[in-house]
Image (cartoon, rainbow, N blue to C red):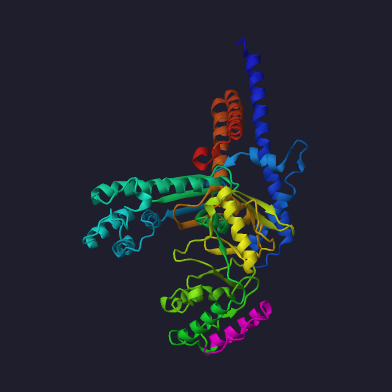
């Protein structure tokens, strides 16, 4: 007992340190409550998308006061980094399950072959997967075996292609090829897992959880504290396929003639709109005329295409349409009967829609100069760095730097665009984000470029994040997503805290009732230990969950 004083001193010091560590949690809670009160006062509950608007206002408030001193010794941003991390069950957040497309991986390994047996096996595997628990690769191998005839997996136009020549040759049997394909698929899923991890690290949540679910290609992602599910879905499912294309010049006569012929052909293929649809189309035409007053007035009741599409859009857009009609127009333009109408000088044209602004009701259609292989002039693998920034008009934008090869191609492409009076379409995941013209004679040297548009700061951060992390080796389809929000999350917090406090009070009372003065000492020690445990959790950056409390 001679060291009792030293023990008390250490206990006192540890207690102070724990209280100091927990103070950051109280500070962030206080500031966030103030932000919620401020946002609730500013945003009327009657507005559309009230919850989203209020949360956006909260985020702006917290961002504006993030560097202000709180309680004289820290800032909100610093306190947020040091607060006690709470898990998804306590804090709420977003839970997303992704399915990495094994079909896309197989197509990539086969170099996007046109082999009919291979593609029929993929189609059969798609059908079988709807009613089977077997993995997609097993279903594909089974389907291929059933229809292969004289074909084999090691055919030069399937897996024994140039890209796989180091591992597969045409003399190998199917049984020899299958393990290699399985390994390649697993490597691609691991690659997708790492890309997603890098993206999530830049999302700005504490202690995210990401894990694979066996060999199925499914990946589970938990983002504690995140609320914007649309933003999370875009971040996780984006393949980050960045491409640079040259557009055709505005008013290209060959393309205008194509649209006129396509409209005539569609008259015999598409049922004419009802009177109600025609009335609605005329209202949309009125909206479109405000956007493009010089457009050709070709809309009529008997014109299926021109009821929905107006030529000569703004900038380098070849046409413009209401967003709700873009899917139908796109399906028409992909029809083989319609594609065959393209004149020889524009026969490989690639049509893509722009990414519309959040409040827009219309979208521009861009005609991109393509080739027989449908490959872009420059692909995203030449981008060495990406960052969120502001453009010359102080609007959120994404800046990019290219490697040496990309810089040379960029200078050549921009030089041609300047000579041809065409635009450069910057395309991400088959959406045209921007298509500026090039005024600089001789092109733009140095390999720097910029994606501009109607972005928010969070959107530019996410775009830069996915470009830095790299593209996914295959598409990631969201098969399940939900927000653990004010209902489930708050109920969990309230019930967990209530049960904890009730149990704590009963234990303290029982200890005093049964042990008397010794029970009081035990209660003090128990309370001190709880503070100490939470303080250590906060200092280590560990995550507190409901099972942890239990």
Is residue 288 placed above or below 7 in the rendered structure?
Answer: below
Give residue 452's position: percent from left, percent from top: 66, 60
Q: Is residue 300 magenta?
A: yes
Quadrant of the rendered image containing residue 166: top left
Q: Please check the rendered image and state whether residue 239 is part of the magenta-colored stretch, yes or no.
A: no
Residue drawn at x 41%, y 56% as measured from the top left: 101
Quarter assignment of residue 54: bottom right
Residue 192, relative to residue 290: is it above or below?
above
Q: Quadrant of the N terminus?
A: top right
Residue 26 place in picture, x, y as percent = 68, 40
Please state which of residues 215 and 62 is positioned toward the viewer in this rendering: 215
Q: Is residue 483 left or right of residue 312?
A: left
Q: Residue at x 68, y 64 (%)?
A: 45
Numbered-mark total? 0
**Vertically, is 418 above or below 505?**
below
Residue 539: image x %, image y %?
Answer: 61, 32
Where does residue 39 sit, x and y in percent of width and height? 71, 57
Q: Is residue 160 visible?
A: yes
Q: Nearer the viewer, residue 73 or 137?
A: 137
Identify the residue at image location x=62%, y=75%: 313
Relative to residue 197, is residue 68 drawn left or right? right
* Residue that protrudes farthest toward the top in the picture: 2
| Quarter assignment of residue 139 | bottom left
Q: Which residues are magenta?
A: 276-302
Whether residue 214 is visible to the viewer of this picture, yes or no, is: no
Q: Nearer the viewer, residue 118 or 528?
A: 118
Give the residue drawn at x 25%, y 47%: 176
In this rendered view, identify the residue nearer to me: 424 or 526: 424
**In the rendered image of this protein, does residue 304 appear above or below residue 36?**
below
């Amino acid at each position: 007992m001679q060291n009792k004083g030293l023990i008390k001193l250490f206990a006192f010091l540890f207690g102070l340190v724990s209280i100091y560590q927990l103070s950051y949690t109280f500070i962030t809670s206080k500031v966030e409550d103030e932000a919620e009160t401020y946002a609730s006062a500013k945003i009327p509950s009657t507005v559309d998308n009230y919850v989203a608007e209020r949360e956006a206002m909260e985020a702006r408030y917290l961002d504006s006061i993030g560097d202000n001193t709180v309680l004289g010794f820290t800032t909100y941003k610093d306190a947020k980094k040091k607060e006690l991390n709470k898990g998804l069950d306590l804090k709420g957040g977003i839970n997303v399950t992704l399915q990495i497309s094994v079909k896309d991986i197989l197509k990539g390994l086969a170099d996007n072959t046109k082999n009919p047996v291979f593609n029929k096996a993929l189609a059969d595997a798609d059908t079988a997967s709807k009613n089977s628990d077997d993995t997609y690769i097993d279903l594909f191998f089974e389907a291929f075996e059933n229809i292969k005839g004289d074909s084999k997996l090691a055919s030069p136009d399937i897996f024994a292609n140039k890209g796989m020549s180091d591992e597969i040759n045409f003399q190998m049997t199917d049984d020899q090829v299958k393990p290699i394909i399985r390994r390649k698929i697993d490597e691609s899923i691991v690659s997708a897992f790492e890309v997603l991890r890098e993206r999530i690290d830049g999302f700005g949540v504490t202690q995210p959880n990401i894990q694979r679910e066996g060999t199925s290609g499914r990946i589970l992602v938990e983002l504690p504290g995140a609320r914007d599910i649309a933003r999370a879905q875009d971040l996780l499912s984006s393949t980050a396929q960045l491409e640079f294309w040259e557009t055709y010049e505005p008013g290209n006569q060959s393309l205008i003639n194509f649209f006129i012929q396509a409209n005539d052909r569609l008259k015999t293929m598409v049922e004419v709109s009802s009177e109600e649809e025609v009335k609605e189309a005329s209202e949309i035409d009125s909206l479109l005329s405000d956007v493009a007053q010089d457009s050709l007035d070709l809309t009529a009741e008997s014109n299926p295409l021109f009821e929905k599409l107006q030529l000569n859009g703004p900038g380098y857009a070849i046409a413009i349409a209401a967003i709700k009609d873009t899917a139908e127009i796109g399906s028409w333009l992909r029809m083989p009967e319609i594609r065959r109408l393209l004149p020889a000088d524009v026969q490989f044209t690639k049509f893509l829609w722009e990414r519309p602004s959040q409040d827009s009701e219309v979208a521009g259609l861009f005609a991109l100069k393509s080739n027989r292989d449908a490959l872009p002039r420059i692909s995203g693998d030449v981008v060495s760095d990406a960052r969120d920034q502001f453009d010359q008009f102080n609007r959120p934008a994404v800046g990019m730097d290219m490697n040496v090869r990309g810089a040379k191609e960029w200078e050549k492409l921009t030089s041609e665009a300047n000579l041809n009076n065409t635009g450069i379409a910057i395309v991400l995941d088959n959406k045209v984000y921007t298509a500026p013209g090039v005024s600089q004679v001789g092109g733009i040297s140095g390999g720097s470029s910029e994606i501009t548009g109607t972005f928010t700061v969070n959107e530019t951060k996410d775009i830069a994040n996915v470009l830095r992390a790299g593209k996914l080796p295959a598409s990631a389809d969201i098969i399940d997503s939900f927000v653990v929000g004010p209902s489930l999350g708050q109920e969990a917090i309230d019930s967990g805290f209530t049960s904890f406090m009730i149990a704590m009070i009963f234990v303290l009372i029982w200890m005093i009732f049964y042990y008397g003065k010794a029970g009081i000492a035990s209660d003090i020690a128990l309370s001190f230990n709880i503070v100490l445990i939470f303080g250590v959790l906060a200092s280590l950056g560990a995550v507190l969950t409901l099972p942890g409390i239990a």
